[in-house]
Amino acid sequence: MQEILEAIEGGASGDDIAALAIPESYRAAHVLRAEQEMWEGVPSSDKDPRKSLHIGQVPTPELAPDEVYVAVMASAINFNTVWTSIFEPLPTFGFLDRLGSESVWGARHAQDFHVVGSDASGVILEAGSAVRSWKPGDRVTVHCNYVDDQDPSSHDDSMLAANQRIWGFESNYGGLADLAIVKANQLMPKPAHLTWEEAAVNGLCASTSYRMLVGRHAARMKQGDNVFIWGATGGIGAYATQLVLNGGGTPVGVVSSGDRARLLNAMGCEHVVDRKTEGYRFWTDENTQDEGEWRRLGKTVRSLIGDDPDIVFEHPGRQTMGASVFIAKRGGTIVTCAATSGFMIEYDNRHLWMKLKRIVSSHFANYQEAWDMNRLIDRGAIQPVMSAVYPLEQVGEAARVVHRNEAEGKLAVLCLAPEAGRGVTDTEKRERVGEDRITLFQRHARGEL
Ligand SMILES: NC(=O)c1ccc[n+]([C@@H]2O[C@H](COP(=O)([O-])OP(=O)(O)OC[C@H]3O[C@@H](n4cnc5c(N)ncnc54)[C@H](OP(=O)(O)O)[C@@H]3O)[C@@H](O)[C@H]2O)c1
């Protein structure tokens, strides 16, 4: 891998990179099938990803004709890294076994280790014989929609494909490693003005928020829409906030501290609800919600923007869905992609049907949506929300920080990149977009705002 790194950093040509030998094994963050029962009886909050995420060598799989080997310079922690490491709601080995039973190439994935990670930036080392648009030496980012394009169900909207998977979560050989295997239809050009780690953090979260809000399959935000965003400085929330601002809407962002409120203001989001300081308790006990608290939140939103939200950007799930359905405008949309605090949702259906609201589900993004989002980042319209960078050896610690809701935005992980700050090839564009805008989350994390 050292030779590969030197070639990349030395600006080797595509032909030179293509001539490099692919190592027989590589360093990767992974969980083990033998440990999938390790958390039995342990409450979710006490499950420590540092104990279940291992760093070690795994054998390099053979390359399928429609795939490329990517030398991964940087990757990122996603909440699915947390889910995999705490084996919730299910151990991911079941996903790998199912993929393994589908085809000869799928069989490579059914292993006793699972290499995790659903984001990456890096350089293509080798392209399979069926790859047409990409070649060795290309600098890329990777989106995580993993689809078999020989299935007809994948050809209207690939997120509707019967075999749709999330790479590095429902497939093996993900991005938190020095090497990854990636389908050609997951590749996107790396924005030249970003470092490896800034480019690596966007794929999963930014594309998810794009489909939820902007793409034609979910909430279909219009210019001028008021959008209520839970976790507005979190992974998907911080991209949602930017998309609303960029699309001429008004975001109302929810956070859980004054510090996060300041970060939201610095992003240009004027209207903030600090759910902790304001003491919202939507549930009086495990089984009972407090409609008075929904009304209090609704009043707060009206006092901030003079109206109800056209769209509620929902993902905390059980804790907040009752409130989300209540506060949405008559005819408004609640768009959901997750349920961090619990999957069994309860809301008062009268508030939904009597006011003609709709709940729309969304899940990651198709290639076009991911590509369009990558283009917005490439144009400097949307910024990476990277707050900190970890070396691959500390991937467990980084996942723990996300699990404990202690980080804003995204945490990047350096894989082959020996240090942060490398990979920018267009400094003029970086200046044009603005160092301050690109590094807002990092500067906030360092206490510089
Ligand atoms: N379906 C998909 O394709 C997809 C894609 C990406 C993510 N997801 C899922 O979406 C969820 C969020 O992901 P993320 O990357 O944004 O995570 P994240 O970076 O941890 O951010 C989530 C934010 O939600 C807020 N939050 C957490 N628990 C809450 C609660 N009980 N009530 C209100 N707010 C709460 C927190 O903000 P404050 O504490 O500041 O309020 C937190 O910062 C995860 O469950 C993830 O698995 C799904």
Image (cartoon, rainbow, N blue to C red):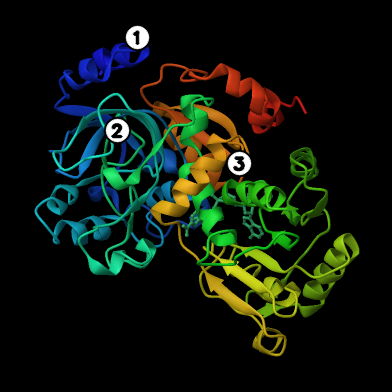
Q: What amino acid is at disc 3?
A: Gly
In this rendering, does residue 83 appear at all?
no
**Vertical position of residue 222 compared to residue 21: above or below:** below
Q: What amino acid is at disc 2?
A: Ala
Quarter where residue 328 is shown: bottom right
Residue drawn at (80%, 70%) of the image: 308
- Residue at the far front in the pictured view: 132
* Residue 210 x %, y %: 55, 54
Alpha carbon of mark 1 to alpha carbon of mark 2: how far? 24 Å
Mark 1 crowdedness (10 Å alpha carbons): few <14, some 14-19, many ≥20: few
Report helix, strand or loop for mark 1: loop
Query: Residue 285 versus residue 73: which sits nearer the camera?
Result: 73
Residue marked by disc 1: 10
Report helix, strand or loop for mark 3: loop
Ligand 1 rendered quadrant: bottom right
Query: Quick one: label 1 or label 2, which is nearer the N terminus?
Result: 1
**Vertical position of residue 364 compared to residue 26: above or below:** below
Q: What amino acid is at disc 1?
A: Gly
For ligand 1, tell me if the residue under mark 3 lies within 8 Å.
Answer: yes
Residue mark closest to the camera, 1 vs 3 = 1
Residue marked by disc 2: 28
* Residue 425 x %, y %: 48, 18
